Amino acid sequence: VQLQASGGGLVQAGDSLTLSCAASEHTFSDLPVGWFRQAPGKEREFVAALRWGRQTHYSNFVKGRFTISKDNARNTVYLQMSSLQPEDTAVYYCATAVSYLIQSSLFSPESWRYWGQGTQVTVSS
């Protein structure tokens, strides 16, 4: 299973950006898909997840600004980010699991089996 994340870049505060995560040798189906991020010197933290193809979960610091979605035809997961702030600067990783996850386990990186290589998002003030 390979996940390819893309779409990162350098933007200004208040801008929007959409990240993509394409899967090869794997079909997301209704398995959980998620996004995490890791800033320099910090631990990887949960950003958003999609369960059952329709149930969304967001961390408090992105709720209302970020939207996770999935295109089954393209086998691609997206993270639409708006109102970006400098504190959103990080490497963003997509992930998927091989089994269904209970809600409490979504937030732990250890729950996720496959990871993309990460895409850098830098927000300037």
Image (cartoon, rainbow, N blue to C red):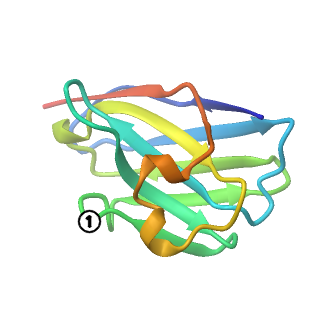
Q: Which residue is more in the foreground, 79 or 16?
A: 79
Compared across the picture, whether 40 is left or right of 112 comes to: left
* Residue 86: % across, % down: 18, 36
* Residue 102: % across, % down: 54, 73
Q: Residue at x 55, y 41 (%)?
A: 94
Q: Relative to residue 50, is residue 103 depicted above or below? A: below
Compared across the picture, whether 52 is left or right of 58 comes to: right
Q: Which residue is more in the foreground, 68 or 30?
A: 30
* Residue 44: % across, % down: 34, 39
Circle 1 is placed at which residue position?
A: 60
Q: Residue at x 69, y 69 (%)?
A: 53
Q: Relative to residue 110, is residue 56 depicted above or below? A: below
Compared across the picture, whether 36 is left or right of 65 comes to: right
On-image quarter of the N terminus: top right
Q: Which residue is more in the foreground, 14 or 67?
A: 67
Type of amino acid at the residue the image marks with label 1 = Asn
Compared across the picture, whether 95 is left or right of 12 comes to: right
Q: Residue at x 49, y 36 (%)?
A: 93
Which residue lies most toward the front here?
A: 110
* Residue 26: % across, % down: 83, 43
Q: Residue at x 43, y 35 (%)?
A: 92
